Image (tube, rainbow, N blue to C red):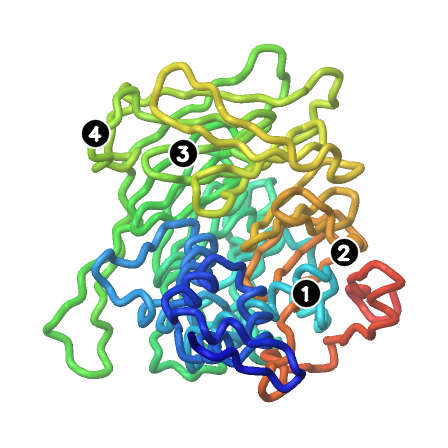
Amino acid sequence: MASVTESRRGMRDFISDLPPELSRLILSRLEIRDVFMCAAVCRAWRSHTRINDSLYIPHLLQKYSNITHGRDPIPPRANIGQELLQRFPHLSASSYFCNPKSLRDLALRDMHLRNKWKSGIPRRRANLNACMKHNDVIFSVVIDQVYGLIVSGDRSGGVVFWSTRTQEMIKELSLAQGPNEDVPAISPAISAMAVKGDHLVIGTWHLTVHIARRDSEDSPIENRAFSLVSSFQVPSPVISIILEGETCIVGCHRGEVVFYSIGIPEENPNTTNGEDSITGYNPTHLLTIQIPRRAGIRQPKFNLSMHYRKPFLFTSSDLVSQLTPKRMDQDNGRDLWQYEAQDITIKTSSGNMSGLDPDYLCMLRPLCDEGDLLVAWPDLSVYSLGNFNSRLVWTPKSKVLVDRAHSQPVRCMGTIDGFFLTGSFDNSVRLFGENGTPVHEPFIHQGAVNSLATDPCFFVSVSDDKTVMLWDFTPPSYETGESTFSSPGATSTLSSSESSSSPATSPPSTPGL
């Protein structure tokens, strides 16, 4: 019989006597936090946690799927470990996951990051618009992980690109019409934006969607962003927008859902150095579907938010509408816009709306990687909604997460692996665990919160107070002790006393306000 070794503290190290396969099996069934705790128990487990990277694959793979909502799966025959090491650095606009040494290194970084999110206390906050590059109310914001950009758009048609590396503006666009043009009475507001791959689409209240292409990597990094290349018209003001590959899905004010190919041209191989290898863009209309007006609603608000999961499109007003093929392909080969309009039906699901003001809204966001939706109903509750299919009779599976998220309607939402955020007309953003448990105090603004954009390491909120607030949850590097964001004058680091005693608050949009 094998002898039982003694640990330094006089404890019996019976784990070392177990067969290695059994020891690894025990570790593989644990949560990632417990795996690291086991490393302190005995030499055998400590050795396994340091040399056996396969222990961390299930956790990291699930996190990757949740962050991408299952849209970019790792190929079945690929080396999963190598794929995770290559893909994780590109999941965030910060440098927190860059240059990982191993899967253990990635898992350890993620554990520190998750603990920071669980605390609900950002390590630092910054108003990127402290220099007032936006002089009007800011309506929309998106994050580009590739170039590390935050893109914000305001009511006057201004679009500003901010660097997450320096937290400074690197480029701006003005999409307001010129003074000599026949400017309609409606504001040129940047109402919605979406970024995917090498393209950014910008929707406005001026019935226009602008297409911007990513600047070449040959451009200086200090002003590398996106440049306008084309545009197309839609029948009514843009409310929400999605970019799926080359297809732009636009939700309009009067209930139209318009599908356009953005017309990405082929590269011209016969160009010489210095010449543009891309010819002109040619946006092409694919399909238009009209969301019907419900009886008894005088001024319905259509397409407040949208989500596409092949082949279903979900859109919200005061309820959730599911646009689905009447008969879906068995292999799910076609996207929704590849069906004829007469082959598409609309199913709806609603929450409790009795006695509610007509201005109360319904918002939706994708939740994790299982195809469920996060839905904020007009009665201020938040549910998870699932069981989507192509059957004509739809019985959604719903689960209440939050009975009352805010004192006023939810205006926008964001999801992060294990957490979700809600922004409201009550001037606050709230952070919840995935089960609906509130995390710490609200993030208070000085105006209604109009849009949220989320990153695995931080989130950005924009509001009527003209601030572009970056709330950074990135912990210091556990090796170097350095932050992955720089810290200019507009940034404030939260002290432990400030964080624990008061809610995080956005600073005034102008000095001395």
Give the residue displayed 12% in from the left and 71% down from the top: 269
Which residue is tagged 2? Answer: 443
Of residues 149 and 179, the one nearer the viewer is 149
Nearer the N terminus, badge 3 or badge 2?
3
Of residues 214 and 2, the one nearer the viewer is 2
Which residue is tagged 1? Answer: 471
The reply to whether residue 33 is in sight is yes
Which residue is tagged 4? Answer: 330
Rounded to the nearest angstrom, the CA distance separating label 3 from label 1 is 31 Å
Which residue is tagged 3? Answer: 313
Badge 2 density bin: few <14, some 14–19, many ≥20, Cα 10 Å:
many
Amino acid under disc 3: Leu
Of residues 88 and 469, the one nearer the viewer is 88
Nearer the N terminus, badge 3 or badge 1?
3
Q: Residue furthest left?
A: 270
At mark 2, the secondary structure is: strand
Rounded to the nearest angstrom, the CA distance separating label 1 from label 2 is 9 Å
Rounded to the nearest angstrom, the CA distance separating label 4 from label 3 is 18 Å
